[in-house]
Image (cartoon, rainbow, N blue to C red):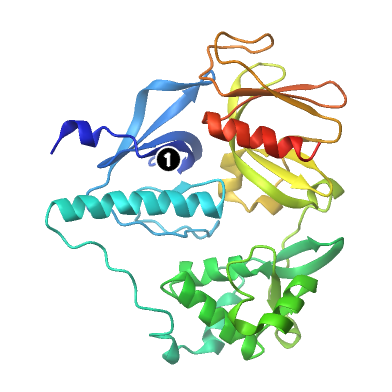
Amino acid sequence: MDTDKTNVILREGFLVKRGHVVHNWKARWFVLMPDKLLYYKYEGGQKDSCQRGKILLKDCVITCPFLEYENRPNGVDHYLEACSREERDDWAGNIMAAVNKLRAAEGGNVANQPDPAGSRLHNINLSKVLDSMYDVHSGIRMSNHVEQGSTYSNCFSGSAVVDWLVFMQLALTRVEAMTLASALVEEGFLRTVGLKSVEAYRTAGLSEQFMDDSTALYSFSDSLKKRGSVKAEKSLSAVELSGKVIKRGYLLKQGHRRKNWKVRLFVLRSQPSYLHYYDPTKVSRHPMDDISPAGGFSLRGCLVSSLQDNGVPSGVKGNVQGNLFKIITQSDTRYFIQAPTEQQKMDWIEAIREHT
């Protein structure tokens, strides 16, 4: 095999990885190559020169999504988490493409796609699916959601239903999961919640409302809720956390006191406009709605600007990698932030400016 080709970087960025010996979660810089996935620590705002480990892609099997928090099974070597469903699916698709290319180069069979939606759904017992979904230990997680100023309790999003059905292997594909979810609504096991879902159901019917929509809300039927076996998860109710999520991603942030650099999951919300940041290892163990942000601030009156990569700007400590930008809040607090790439830096600056 051509050595040059195996050293080509296909993709790189932050992911959160679970340790092998001590099962703690750490943010690492991952580099995808045609035959392996390398990962590095980030020290002092720079990628460490020595890799922390590598995952050989030959004969790898990828399970995506893998979203349960308390019930992650053992027996799989590597657990990785991205900053969003979209980012997760992109990484999984890129890794799977590399694995399939390796198999094809060695004369093996490329992983087959599962059967089309509906091919094995006719034998599924919807009552059993519902019982599994309602199970207090492994069932779908319910929480409070805010939509257009109204709070809806004991509900979940359409995309959460699809994720759960695929994770539990009750459906092989997301399309299959949407078909199954629609059947649950049609039979009255699940009901629409909130204005968006009710309107989607009324105008588009069952073919559209579960299209992986993270903002359309659903709940168990009122008759099922009377069992009272599931308690809604406590959700954060602060006004500043009630806005719609516009953007999220991993960025490096310089601390205010120690001036050290740490990977944080940044979440930009609008109406009201706030920028919060979370410890990504805590988000790996709990849903984001169940934990408090490590910090955050209102974007009203903020100034955001790109910083030059030649030299170390005033206020920045360490020999940082680059892609720096600065946010000055209305109260004159300065935040120094480092994006993984130049494009991501510009995307974040644009998104923040739109909401200041």
How far from the left and from the top, in percent, is residue 80? 45, 47
| Quadrant housing the N terminus | top left
Q: Give the structural element (helix, strand or loop) at label 1.
A: loop
State the residue at coordinates (67%, 81%).
204
Q: Is residue 237 left or right of residue 221?
A: right
How far from the left and from the top, in percent, is residue 256? 72, 19
Q: Quadrant of residue 183?
A: bottom right
Q: Is residue 95 left or right of residue 191?
A: left
How far from the left and from the top, in percent, is residue 19? 42, 40
Q: Is residue 53 visible?
A: yes
Q: Quadrant of residue 160?
A: bottom right
State the residue at coordinates (39%, 85%).
120
Up-down relation of residue 71 to residue 228 (above or below): above
Category of crowding for the residue at label 1, using alpha-carbon neighbours closer than 10 angstroms: few (below 14), some (14–19), many (at least 20): some
Count of labels in the image: 1
Of residue 258 and residue 301, the one placed in the foreground of this image is 301
Q: Is residue 296 left or right of residue 208?
A: right
How far from the left and from the top, in percent, is residue 299? 81, 36
| Quadrant housing the C terminus | top right
State the residue at coordinates (35%, 27%).
51
Up-down relation of residue 105 to residue 139 (above or below): above
Up-down relation of residue 145 to residue 27 (above or below): below
Up-down relation of residue 4 to residue 146 (above or below): above
Mark 1 highlights which residue? 19
Q: Quadrant of residue 206?
A: bottom right
Q: Amino acid at mark 1?
A: Gly
Q: Is residue 131 visible?
A: no
Of residue 64 and residue 143, the one placed in the foreground of this image is 64
Of residue 341 and residue 58, the one placed in the foreground of this image is 341
State the residue at coordinates (61%, 32%).
346
Of residue 306 and residue 118, the one placed in the foreground of this image is 306
